[in-house]
Image (cartoon, helix red, strand yellow):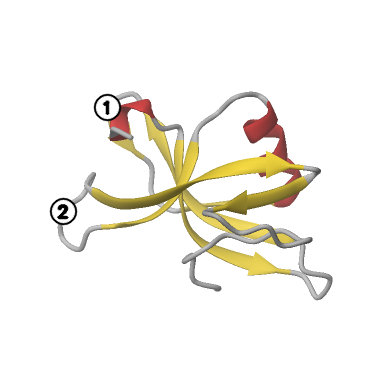
Amino acid sequence: MPLKDLDGIVEAVRYRQDGSIEAVRYYQRRGSVWSDALLLDRAGLLLLLKDGRKFVAGRRKRDQGGEFDVGAALRCEDRRIRSGATRANRDHLENVPIF
């Protein structure tokens, strides 16, 4: 998926003890540029995904500003937030490091 079609790139995640997402660290696309790293709680991320915003897992390329390595798209299934092929019964972002 081209970067220009994305609304955000999730770089890291923090989970609660029950397995749900507490917060994500992400970059937001603002026109042709990307924000600095921002924090977003689970409710905010869920709202954006349900609104049709496109988020993927990924990370910023070192010393390359607005260039990213992108991974799997985030999706909302049964009130769970997931990426990749996982079918866990909790939130799970595949290949996204924990912070």
Q: Secondary structure at mark 2?
A: loop
Q: Quadrant of residue 19?
A: bottom right
Residue 99 on image: x %, y %: 55, 73
Query: What residue do we see at 27% from left, 27% from top?
Result: 32
Reading the image, the residue beneath label 1 is 32
Taking the spot 55% from the left edge, 55% from the top edge, the residue there is 85
Rounded to the nearest whole Å, what is the CA distance between mark 1 and mark 2?
Answer: 15 Å
Identify the residue at image location x=22%, y=58%: 61
Amino acid carrying label 2: it is Gln
Picture layout, residue 30 above or below residue 73: above
What is the quadrant of residue 49 in the picture? top right
**37 sits left or right of 79 in the view:** left
Q: Residues within 10 Å of mark 1 (few under 14, many from 20)?
A: few
Residue 14 position in % (x across, y down): 64, 68
The mark nearer the N terminus, 1 or 2, is 1
Tell me the residue at 80%/75% (across/down).
17
For the residue marked with disc 1, what is the amino acid? Ser
